[in-house]
Image (cartoon, grey):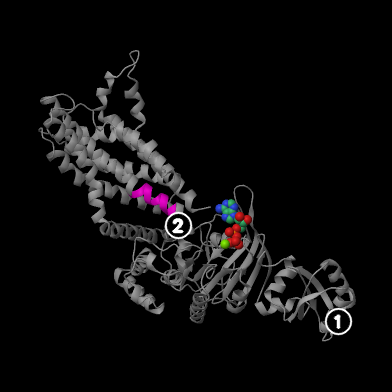
Amino acid sequence: MPRLSAEAEITSVPAPAAGRAEVIRTEKLTKVYPGGVKAVDEIDLGVYEGEIFGLLGPNGAGKTTTTGMLTTTVIPTSGRAWVGGIDVIAQPALAKQVIGVVPQTNTLDRALTVWENLYYHGRFFGMSAKEARAEADFRLEQFRLTDRAKMPVLALSGGMAQRLMVARSILHHPAILFLDEPTAGLDPQSRIALWEILGQLHAQGQTILLTTHYMEEADQLCDRLAIVDHGRLLALDTPGALKRSIDADTVITISADGDLDRLAAMLRDSVAGVDNTQQVDGSVALGVRGSRAALRDVIAVAERGGYAINDISVSEPTLETVFIQLTGKDLRD
Amino acid sequence: MTTATAPVAPTPAVSLRRPLRPTRAAAITAFKALLLRDLTVQRKNLKEFIPRTILQPFLLVFVFTYVFPRIGTGVGGGGGRAAAFSTTLVSGVVGMAIMFQGIQQVALPMVQEFGYTKEIEDRVMAPMPVWMVAIGKVVNGALCGLFSALLVFPIAAVVPATPVHLHVNWPVLLTITPLACLLSASFGLTFGTRFDPRQVPILFGVILIPITFLGAIYYPWTSLSAIKVGGFSWLKWLVVLNPLVYICEGFRAALTRSPHMSLWVVYLVMIGFTAALLYLGIKGFRRRVLS
Ligand SMILES: Nc1ncnc2c1ncn2[C@@H]1O[C@H](COP(=O)(O)OP(=O)(O)O)[C@@H](O)[C@H]1O
Ligand SMILES: [Mg+2]
């Protein structure tokens, strides 16, 4: 039978050295599931204290697996990981003290009421009855759930259940809060409410790691983010820096019928300042650098080629553009 | 602020928002809180728990030891033999009640939690090793088994129309009871981690029914010697795989002077079964919550 891991040696540590402390650190973190799927492939991450860090990637990119490894429920195949300075592989039970987790599925305890879900969570984390009661009351108030306190959790709407999960996950003051696709499946109103909550927590200094496949969410919420696909980390920076990293400063998207390969080739050859072209969903996206005349040229070239233009748009590069440039495909694929 | 020194990440120290507690102390507190949570849930369910626990044993005792003797269909023959049967049945009914709790309180909820609700994940995130969460389930199931034994025992002793001859051997009773409760709850853990919701009918029909019918509830195990093919007591040796046999025989030794299996065998096999089922159950539990 497995045994309790060796007791941690608890000592005072000098104040953090110059530079920001990393609350999460991974080194070549890798997960190969039985059957051979390499879900996470040698990921190196560092998450700073107090930041909202995003893992952005399409379905199957390995976001849940990465979160699972950092929260002790997925056992890494190789590599190392620390949360709050604790080695999650060597000391999972200790690591659980410093993390709060909101998983993708609803894991509220259905045998308990709304209030009891918070109260017993506090008790699990070593709070006295009095402390847990006070924390539960406080969090219900903070998350505007006080009037539901005595309800069974099954009576909550999706948005309320999500708020309760967040309230529960931070009740024990974790050093880091993990949220796996927190807004997937929420109605727009609940999504905005959750963004506000995360903003407030961030303002109070809570370190947050969230995963998402919505680029708007990553763009708006995250201080820094990692773009992942097929288990690999493709880029890691602030949203602004990621968008600036692509050479083009304008994206022209043209939707037309006919041979898009030929259209893309024509545009590359004839329009000044084209940096790259990508084909997505029946349209060609051109990354263009510093050319005001480009739009006119694009239309002229397409018409000369005999294409009927369905739609044309000009935009700033987005994280979507960054993702397309990195992977050659759409985030939604 | 404090943090663990060893092994440390190669980074500046993180200021934790709450001081770390030693792993073992935190795990023990979490485990106690887990039991407290289960107790709360049991208290809420008491209105369902009591009828569900006592109805089946009550009907069993009522039909076999009250109705049958009255209508002249005494099981095990008339007069003294009927009284002997009532006495035999007491230990069987108590053993069965405990065995059922392992299924009701551990296996079935776990099948649901792993199959649909996933709510067990929240307790897995409590600051304790995963195996302790599984042990918590077992302890809760064992306590429910104990409680159900206390509910059912008076029924088996009082309802029969013919006298029940009890003769309590306290040292045996006080050791067999917790052992039986742990064995049944471990049984529930093993099955709860290995079945998915669609297989629950199989759990009942193919596993639980033979276990109860061939669990030495209605007859002492030794009496099966009479069932022979070519001089070999095949049924007697077939049912040694059934954990309920040892539970019922143990209670038979603890509560009555009916013939019973050697106590050495009863204790050894019960401890062996409990250890094996706990091992398999914890392994299954880890496999279900970790990947
Ligand atoms: N328990 C598992 N067993 C086998 N393969 C898995 C398991 N969980 C996830 N995978 C596979 O690993 C890859 C990454 O999955 P996941 O981490 O869930 O991605 P994401 O959360 O980004 O959608 C996918 O190909 C998925 O099919
Ligand atoms: Mg996922």
A245 falls in the magenta region = no
* Residue B159 position within the rendered picture, expressed as x and y whole percent measured from the top left: 13, 39
Q: In terms of depth relative to the viewer, which is nearer, A316 or A238?
A: A316
Q: Which of marks 2 and 1 is in front?
A: 1
Q: In which quarter of the image is ligand 2?
A: bottom right
Q: Which mark is residue B77?
A: none
Characterize the local packing of mark 1: few (<14), some (14-19) or many (20 or more) Cα atoms within 10 angstroms.
some
In the image, taking residue A24 as reference, residue A227 lies left or right, namely right
Mark 2 vs mark 1: same chain?
A: no
* Residue occupying the far top of the picture: B230
Identity of the amino acid at label 1?
Answer: Asp
Considering every residue shown, the one lying at the far bottom of the view is A292
Residue placed at 52% from the left, 75% from the top? A191
Query: Residue A281, percent across and down?
Result: 73, 68
Q: Determine if the C-beta at disc 2 is less than 8 A from ligand 1.
A: no
Q: Which is the main secondary structure of the residues drawn in magenta?
A: helix
Q: Which chain carries label 2?
A: B
Q: Which mark is residue A297?
A: 1
Amino acid marked by disc 2: Lys
Q: Does the magenta stretch include residue B108?
A: yes
Q: Nearer the viewer, residue B260 or A97?
A: B260
Residue at 33 percent across and 33 percent down: it is B269
Residue B239 appears anywhere in the view: yes
From which residue to which does the magenta span run? B105-114
Residue B19 in view of the camera: no
A107 relative position to B57: left or right: right
Seen from the viewer's position, the closer of residues A176 and A79 is A176
Q: For the point 39% across and 36% down, which residue is it?
A: B206
Q: What element carries label 2?
A: loop
Q: Mark 2 points at which residue?
A: B118
Q: Where does the N terminus of chain B fall, quadrant-wise? A: bottom left
